[in-house]
Image: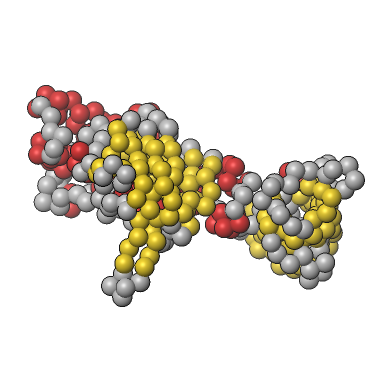
């Protein structure tokens, strides 16, 4: 549904500074897929979205939407935003405050480039109003709606255009935490029900993992890594991605090869067998990463087993967070809330070998 190839965009600031907002960005989005661009401020995610919409123009590159080429620097082609088969929901919602709900939804169908016949307007508006449960508010002024209701109106206006692709730029960032949690599920379920392809921008890691079928994590104008939420969280390839998608413990290690063709990483915590070492590891200095929830109390089969000292313990309701130490090396563990440890206690802990990720670099410090 979306094919983007080698998008590049450079800005010049008022002070003459060159900023490479996009650097060779390429990705594909399948029909019906919920694809998330995730990253910190300045990573290039919103610039990518705005380039797809036509609000920004890439310096070089190519992309097509629903089989139609809408931008190609080689062909000197740049289809105007209003002629692209997309609709966009902005972070600020961009609603007309002097209009009621009905007129906000119907306006682009009556006045825009993609205007339709009156009977078709009625069908579309009736459908989106019912789907988004806006019937009680249809004649209410926008100024009298809550943030969540305004977000639904903005979404209804976009869906009424029946776009091939729905673009969403941090649409939940202005809402409180409880409402964000509710609406992220509603939006994901709605797009799945309608089968609409969605390109979604957010800086919120949890939001991306809850909503995305696939996630592209962006850094410094590039896609650092792309994959399913589970793959990116459990087995990241890129160290920035590992750190950005939640807390991860890192320990330095020295990689060596066993006689049987397998590998072992010698670490301050002990030796960790590693069956498959990826090609990106080019020398013996590595880092091993594991999530705090990967640590279990006691021994497990096919696991690395350590004896650690409890440095600190924090009860957080559904879990206990423990700062642990082995010698001078510290790591965090997220344990069941029934775990009864106190600072100074020693414990045998383990982590499944399949839960470790390996990264290049680092000083082994052995």
- Please name the residue shown 75% across and 43% down the image: 276
Residue 307 against residue 84 in the figure, above or below:
below
Please say which color scheme the image uses: secondary structure
- Where the C terminus falls, by quadrant? bottom right
Instruction: Give whichever of 354, 138 is nearer the camera.
Output: 354
Left or right: 74 as drawn, with respect to 279:
left
Instruction: Give whichever of 222, 212 is nearer the camera.
Output: 222
- Give percent across and percent down for residue 348: 84, 55
- Give percent across and percent down for residue 9: 35, 56
- Please name the residue shown 40% across and 30% down the image: 31
**In terms of image quadrants, where is residue 255?**
bottom right
Residue 324 can be seen, yes or no: no
- Please name the residue shown 67% across and 55% down the image: 359
Left or right: 121 as drawn, with respect to 213:
left
**In terms of image quadrants, where is residue 125?**
top left
- Give percent across and percent down for residue 37: 43, 48
- Give percent across and percent down for residue 156: 25, 38
- Where the N terminus falls, by quadrant? top left
Q: Residue furthest bottom?
A: 15
Left or right: 360 as drawn, with respect to 86:
right
- Please name the residue shown 48% across and 57% down the image: 219
Instruction: Give whichever of 169, 143 is nearer the camera.
Output: 169
Residue 229 can be seen, yes or no: yes
Q: Count of labels shown? A: 0
Q: Residue furthest right?
A: 259
């Amino acid at each position: 549904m979306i094919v983007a190839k080698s998008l590049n965009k450079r800005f010049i600031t008022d002070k003459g500074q060159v900023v490479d907002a996009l650097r060779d960005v390429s990705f594909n989005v399948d029909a019906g897929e919920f694809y998330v661009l995730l990253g910190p401020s300045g990573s290039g995610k919103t610039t990518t979205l705005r380039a797809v919409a036509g609000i920004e123009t890439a310096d070089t590159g190519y992309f097509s939407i629903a089989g139609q080429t809408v931008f190609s620097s080689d062909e000197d082609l740049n289809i105007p935003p209003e002629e692209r088969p997309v609709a966009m929901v902005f972070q600020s919602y961009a609603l007309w405050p002097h209009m009621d709900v009905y007129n906000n939804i119907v306006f682009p169908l009556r006045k825009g480039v993609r205007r339709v016949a009156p009977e078709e307007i009625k069908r579309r508006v009736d459908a989106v109003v019912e789907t988004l449960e806006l019937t009680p508010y249809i004649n209410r002024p926008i100024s009298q709606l809550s943030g969540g209701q305004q977000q639904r109106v903005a979404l209804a206006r976009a869906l009424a255009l029946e776009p091939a692709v729905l673009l969403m730029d941090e649409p939940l960032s202005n809402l409180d935490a409880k409402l964000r949690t509710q609406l992220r599920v509603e939006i994901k379920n709605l797009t799945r029900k309608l089968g609409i392809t969605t390109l979604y921008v957010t800086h919120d890691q949890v939001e991306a993992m809850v909503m995305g079928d696939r996630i592209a994590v962006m850094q410094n104008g590039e896609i650092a890594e792309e994959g399913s939420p589970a793959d990116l969280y459990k087995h990241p390839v890129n160290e920035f991605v590992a750190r950005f998608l939640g807390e991860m413990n890192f320990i330095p290690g020295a990689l060596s090869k066993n006689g049987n063709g397998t590998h072992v990483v010698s670490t301050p915590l002990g030796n960790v067998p590693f069956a498959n070492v990826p090609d990106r590891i080019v020398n013996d200095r590595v880092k091993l990463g594991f999530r705090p929830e990967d640590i279990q109390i006691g021994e497990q089969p096919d696991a690395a087993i350590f004896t650690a000292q409890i440095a600190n313990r924090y009860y957080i309701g559904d879990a206990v967070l423990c700062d642990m130490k082995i010698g001078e090396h510290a790591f965090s563990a997220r344990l069941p809330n029934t775990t009864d440890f106190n600072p100074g206690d020693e414990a045998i802990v383990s982590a499944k070998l399949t839960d470790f990720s390996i990264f290049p670099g680092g000083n082994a410090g052995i």
